[in-house]
Image (cartoon, rainbow, N blue to C red):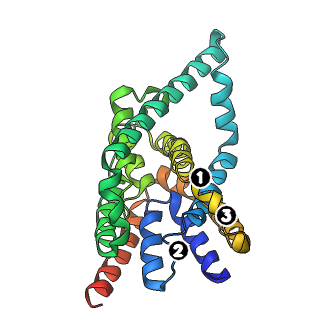
Amino acid sequence: MNFLQTVLLGLVQGLTEFIPVSSSGHLVLAQHFLGIEAGGDISFEVFMHLGTLLAVFIFFHRQIWDLIISLFSWKSGLDGETHRKNRSIIAYLIIATLATGLFYLIFDDMLKGAYDKPLFVAIMLLITGILIFASDFVKNTSVPASNIGFIKSVLIGLAQGIAIIPGISRSGTTITAALFCGVKRKDAAYFSFMLSIPAILAANISEMGSLMALDMSILHLYITGFVVSFNSGYLVIAFLIRLIQSGSLKYFAFYVWLVSAISITLLLIG
């Protein structure tokens, strides 16, 4: 990889990690069509994911801090009720994460080969488009994240697990699942972003061994990917939350359908 390719992949990662268009699918297709040999460089992918993870931490630092404080605050009264709701959110995040982990353990080996099949990835983008298009037609409700419940948490977690398939959007499936479970739009976005933290952390921890073989001669490229994915990811978060609340995700559906159609056509004609 050269510097320009690194910046491009960092942008792809940051811009598509949170918007419902599948960052993994875009990276697979970008690397295939641009001839970028980065698919086997796990260290570079770890750096880019850490960039988007830092974006979530900084954007939601107050909410994350409130959740942490609530674990140790057992007061009564109005503040006590707020802390109780926060602890409920933490419990549902744990349940959803465990459901994701179970799905990952069962199906990960089966689906790893999909990353080498750009045609399959392009077809999965069609499915992502259907999911996010349907989400705009779900009526906004008043169910907060603190009242999601066990069953719905499991369903949202499984939806996140399905997103290990390249071309299936993690944010798209979790937000859509939360909306169909009756969670109000703002809380569906919030829960999806919070749920991304343990998911991205777990994915990166599992690949930390690759950092031991880090090629220091191109460390500047890794850092560039990190910085670019962080900045672009941070800008996307606020933008996406506003779109979810206004019920405007269908425009992303049109985009992924277009990308899918062009990719399938190019792949079939060689």
Q: Nearer the viewer, mark 2 or mark 3?
A: 2
Q: Is residue 44 above or below residue 258?
A: above
Q: Amino acid at mark 1?
A: Met
Q: Residue 38: which numbered mark, if any?
A: 2
123, 20: nearer the viewer: 123
Residue 184: image location, x then y, percent: 44, 39
113, 172: nearer the viewer: 113
> Dot 3, how many residues are within 10 Å of its Cα: few (below 14), some (14-19), or many (20+)?
many
Measure the alpha-carbon separation of dots 1 and 3.
Answer: 15 Å
Q: Nearer the viewer, mark 1 or mark 3?
A: 1
Residue for point 45% across, 64% down: 24
> Dot 2, how many residues are within 10 Å of its Cα: few (below 14), some (14-19), or many (20+)?
some
Compared across the picture, whether 110 is left or right of 147 comes to left
Q: Is residue 192 above or below residue 17?
A: above
Q: Amino acid at mark 3?
A: Phe
**Quadrant location of the C terminus?**
bottom left
Measure the alpha-carbon separation of dots 1 and 2.
Answer: 17 Å
